[in-house]
Amino acid sequence: MCSISRRLGPLPCWLALALIALCAEPALHAQQEPPYFVTYSSVLEEPGNLEIENQNIAAAPKNANAFFAPTVEFEYGVTAWWTTEAYLQGEATQHDSTVFTGFRFENRFRPLPREYWVNPVLYVEYEDVSDADKSFLEITGNTSITTLQVSNALLRKEVEHSVEGKLILSSNAKGWNFSENIIGEKDVNENSPWEFGYAVAAARPLSLRASSHACTLCLQNFAAGAELFGGLGTRYNFGLKQTEQYAGPTFALNAPNGFTYKFSPEFGLNDNAAGVLWRFGVSYEIQQVRDWFRRSR
Amino acid sequence: MKARRLAWFALLGASTLAFAAADGSWLRKVPAAEHARVNPVAGQPDAIAAGHNLYHDNCARCHGADAQGKSGRPALRSPRLSAASDGDLAWILRNGVVFKGMPRWAGLPEQERWQIVAFLRSLNPPASGDRP
């Protein structure tokens, strides 16, 4: 129990901090982030800001039970060129069970000091995720939706400890953002080959000018775009064969009270993919969290 | 105890970097072509009002609601900003000074960045004379 929770009663420290965060002055927010679910852009979290996001996916694949998989992300801007992020994941499958599937820890670095026509970002991640994971945060290697026919009890026994690297390339032009991710992943415990994947996306706000009046449903607060992502096989079996491929539109509303709402239906493009993945997410950005720990504000 | 000391060192480092960003050295890095750019919405009341909203949403938490600076981060009402051109301000908004704490805002549409410049200019009327 921390001193804050001693004052508030028998609350765990993390819950006390979460309550304070929600009751704090209305968080304002940056409108920079494009409305992507899978693809990363070169936009990093502003230094000192903490973004908490709940990202969910639901699907009812053919020949498998419907599932719902929520992910909670904590994204913190350490510096203007370094963002760190932690994920907690779980899933619930109809006629089966609800399980915690694991965690991820990632870091993104922007090595170049200025804005260029193409801006690279380096991404490094460690995953400790069981095979029951259905978050589809990225797709690598040779996969098929038919693996979801296996019960959670069996899938959760296999836990993958893997490292993942991404090269993120991103451009901003005339209000549009274009982003491309090249993904490589390796299970560090098993003698399995490097697996590859990709994600590409484009988006823009519905209005490029801000309104002179504060408003919630102004066009400037909406963004729309499209994403395409999938696996690229392994080191020994590179290509689109036996991979899952998805594409779909994506939408976001940046509400002025600090919340961002995102939605995307992603359509399977080949026989290995599910028909539709429905994604929706809510995020809340708390600005300058580190100021809470400074003496002079 | 060790962790606490480390945290203090980290805070000290961040404050030092933020202070360093306030030294104005970024102005010398602005290319001449960028320095000479003209704000297409300069002086327009609507653009200044929109820029104020954008400033409030994106900048005020670090630079203060009154633009007087906060927690060692620089004030945005200053002779240095009065002397800077609109092009200089647009350049720093796009590129930031990332290794000294100021993030990029290239993800905002260019028109919105010009609206912020219009608002900043309303706080810092241009000084007569040449580039500092």
Image (tube, rainbow, N blue to C red):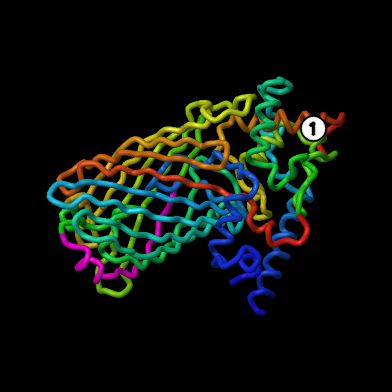
Q: Looking at the image, which residue is at 71% across and 34% down?
A: B35
A264 and A109: which is toward the camera: A264
Q: Is residue A127 left or right of residue A106?
A: left
Per the image, label 1 sits on a secondary structure element best described as: helix
**Residue neighbourhood size for the residue with mark 1, other residues' Cα within 10 Å, grouped as few (<14), some (14–19), many (≥20):** some
In the rendering, at what x and y percent does residue A84 appear?
52, 59
Q: Is residue B24 left or right of residue A274?
A: right
In the rendering, at what x and y percent does residue B45 appear?
72, 20
A47 and A134: which is toward the camera: A134
Quadrant containing the C terminus of chain A is bottom right
Of all residues, the one furthest to the left in this rendering is A63
Of all residues, the one furthest to the right in this rendering is B128
In the rendering, at what x and y percent does residue B61 appear?
68, 46
Specify the quadrant of the image occupied by residue A15.
bottom right
Q: Mark 1 highlights which residue?
A: B123
Of all residues, the one furthest to the front in this rendering is A9
Mark 1 belongs to which amino acid?
Answer: Leu
A68 and A50: which is toward the camera: A68
Q: Is residue B84 left or right of residue A106?
A: right
